Structures are given as C-alpha cells and as structure tokens.
Image (cartoon, helix red, strand yellow):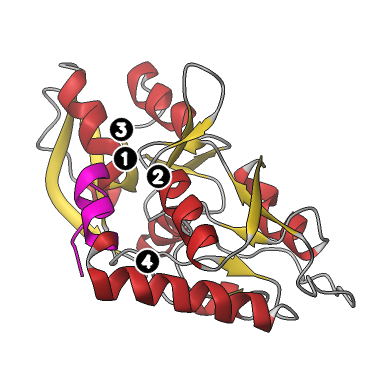
Amino acid sequence: MKNLILTTAALALSAGFAMADTVRLGTEGAYPPFNFLNDAGEIDGFERELGDELCARAELTCEWVTNDWDSIIPNLVSGNYDVIIAGMSITPERDEVIDFTQNYTQPDPSAYMVLTGNEGLDVTGAVIAAQTNTIQAGFVAEMGAPLVEFATPDETISAVRTGEADAVLADKSYLAPIAEENADLTLLERDELIGGGVGMGLRESDGELREKFDAAIQSMKDDGSLNTLIEKWEVGETF
C-alpha cells in the first residue's frame, strides 16, 4: 500500500487521546479504492467502510477528516486528528515516530504503468514517477533509477502521459483499474513487493485507543467480515 518515508523529525505531544468522546479519523480522500471522495463530496471507499465498522465494534463515536498525504503523520502527532487510516503500510521508519495497530490488509504488490506500446521498458534505467513520501519513491531511489516525485497520485499518471516520466510506480490495486479503463496505459508484468501490510496509525501516547482498534480488527479477521470487505473493494489478498 502507500508508504511514507519519514523525512522530518517526530514532534513531541504530551497530551494523548485520553479516550475523548469523539475519535477523529484522518485519511487522504484521494487514493481509490482505499479512500476517495464520492460524487457527494463524502469520504468513501474500503477504509471508510472499514473505519465505520471498527468504530462500531470498539463502541467509539468517530468523525472523518481529510489531510494531504505529505503532512499526514505530522498532523497526527500534533493532534489534528487521532488516527490515520489512509492506506499506510507499517514500516520500521514510521514505527519510530507513531504507533500502529495490527495490519488490516496484506502486503500489496506495487506495479509499473507505462504508455501502451512501451511494454518493453527497462525500468532500471527509466525515469520513474512516484508520489512524494511513499516507499515506492524510496524504492526507486534505492534502485538508482531517475525519480520524479509528485504531491498527488493523479500527477504521477499525468507525468507518464506527458512524457515527463517513462513509468509510474504505485500500488497495483490503485493502478490496475486505471489501466483497465484507459487504452493508452498498460501495466508491466514486473511487480515489486514493498512494505508489510496496512495498519491504523496512532500517536505513541494513545495505547488504550490502539488496543481498542486492535481488538476490533482482530474480531473482523476472526468472523471473516474483513475478508469480505477486502474482496468487495479488491484491495489485495485475503487473510
């Protein structure tokens, strides 16, 4: 899933969630099928449905807020919301700054998308587009290929279409529907396995809240309802 490479120092927050009346869930709202804004301007997608169910099982009153991806961790730490539920993979780098629940999706392959007709592209020497502060961007940098970064996933697709990039690397579950709907775009057969599954991110001081969501996630794994949502939204392999 989308993965943030932390480039800023952690902010200290002395006052945690402390089980307030309302839990604020922060998401990007721009990464279907995980999270997006529907025609009514409301947060929708796999994580909206999942988050609402987790709040119900944890007996919590929740409200949703949107936040740009590149500042989503700093704004959690500074208290603008209480939980990140935004397709964020659990990584050691993040875990140094925030805490995570157990994963609610399996690790998802990342894929390359190119202009149709460019299926023979050698990605190791190609210009690759990726969203800023994702582990896809980090992966390309470590691979040594030229990297161009953009603030939003839509801009990475546009970069391929305009020729600014030869390919885009992103979650396969995000790119596959785009390739299916657009004849000018094609997925390469090569996948990259990056990251370790998606979880909810919380401040390290909010252990009680994390335990509540952990238990709710586990209950959905145990009764099969999490797998049902994963299949419905096509966000990877089931548990």
- The secondary structure type at the circle numbered 2 is loop
Mark 3 crowd level (few <14, some 14–19, many ≥20, 10 Å Cα): many
Q: CA distance from mark 1 to mark 3?
A: 18 Å
Residue 27 location (% of width, % of height): 58, 46
**Disc with the residue nearer the chain's start (2 vs 1):** 2
Mark 1: which secondary structure?
A: helix
User: Is disc 4 in contact with disc 2, using a CB cutoff of under 8 Å?
Assistant: no
Marks 3 & 4, CB-CB < 8 Å contact: no
Tell me the residue at 11%/23% (across/down). Answer: 117
Choose top left, top right, bottom left or bottom right for residue 175: top left
Which comes before the other along the chain, label 4 or label 2? 2
Q: How far apart are the two marked residues, 2 and 1, measured between alpha carbons?
A: 8 Å
Gap in Å between the C-alphas at discs 4 and 1? 17 Å
Camera-near label (3 vs 2) is 2
| Contact (Cβ within 8 Å) of mark 1 with mark 3 | no
Q: Name the residue beneath numbered marker 4.
A: 104
Q: Is residue 196 visible?
A: no
Figure check: 88 above or below 215: above
Write down the residue under mark 3. Answer: 166
Secondary structure under the numbered disc 4 in the rendered image? loop
Look at label 4 and name its amino acid.
Tyr
Q: Alpha-carbon distance for marks 3 and 4? A: 33 Å
Q: Which numbered disc, 4 or 1, marks the residue closer to the eye?
A: 4
Q: Which residue is mark 2?
A: 34
Inspect the magenta stretch and tell me whether residue 67 lies in it. Answer: no
Which comes before the other along the chain, label 4 or label 1? 4
Q: CA distance from mark 3 to mark 2?
A: 26 Å
Q: What is the number of the mark on residue 174?
A: 1
